[in-house]
Image (cartoon, rainbow, N blue to C red):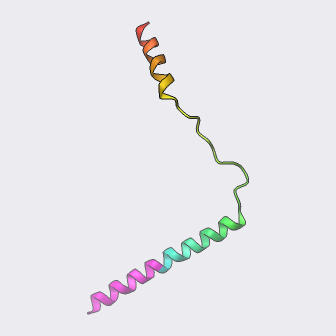
Amino acid sequence: MEISLLLIAALLYLGLALGFILVVDNLVGLVFRESRTPLQLPSFDIGRAFPASQKFHRK
């Protein structure tokens, strides 16, 4: 009986802590908006890279 109450209390505590973290994270996201665009990685074209590597391999 005591173990189940302790388990329920621990799960409720973790749920409340995670909920609090999400609320604070969203509030911080509202205050500090991302003004610059996110970093875009250059696309890697396998179709061009494979023939180029074969060309260098033959030399």
Residue occupying the far front of the picture: 47
Expressed as whole percent of the image width and height from the top left, the position of residue 20 reads 55, 76
Q: Is residue 52 above or below residue 26?
A: above
In the rendered image, which quarter is residue 25 located in? bottom right
Expressed as whole percent of the image width and height from the top left, the position of residue 24 reads 61, 72
Q: Is residue 10 above or below residue 45?
A: below
Expressed as whole percent of the image width and height from the top left, the position of residue 2 reads 28, 92
Is 53 placed left or right of 6 in the picture?
Answer: right
> Residue placed at 56% from the left, 34% from the top?
43
Residue occupying the far top of the picture: 59
Is 35 placed left or right of 49 in the picture?
Answer: right
In the image, residue 25 lies in the stretch drawn in magenta: no
Residue occupying the far left of the picture: 1
- Which corner quadrant holds the N terminus? bottom left
Look at the magenta stretch and give its main secondary structure: helix
Expressed as whole percent of the image width and height from the top left, the position of residue 9 reads 39, 86
Region rendered in magenta: 1-15
> Residue placed at 71% from the left, 62% from the top?
32
Count of marks overlaid on the render: 0
* Front-lying residue, 10 or 27: 27
- Which corner quadrant holds the C terminus? top left
Is 3 placed left or right of 43 in the picture?
Answer: left
* Front-lying residue, 20 or 2: 20
In the image, residue 4 lies in the stretch drawn in magenta: yes
In the rendered image, which quarter is residue 28 located in? bottom right
Q: Is residue 35 above or below residue 42?
A: below
> Residue placed at 58% from the left, 39% from the top?
41
> Residue placed at 41% from the left, 12% from the top?
57
Q: Is residue 57 above or below residue 15?
A: above
* Front-lying residue, 35 or 5: 35
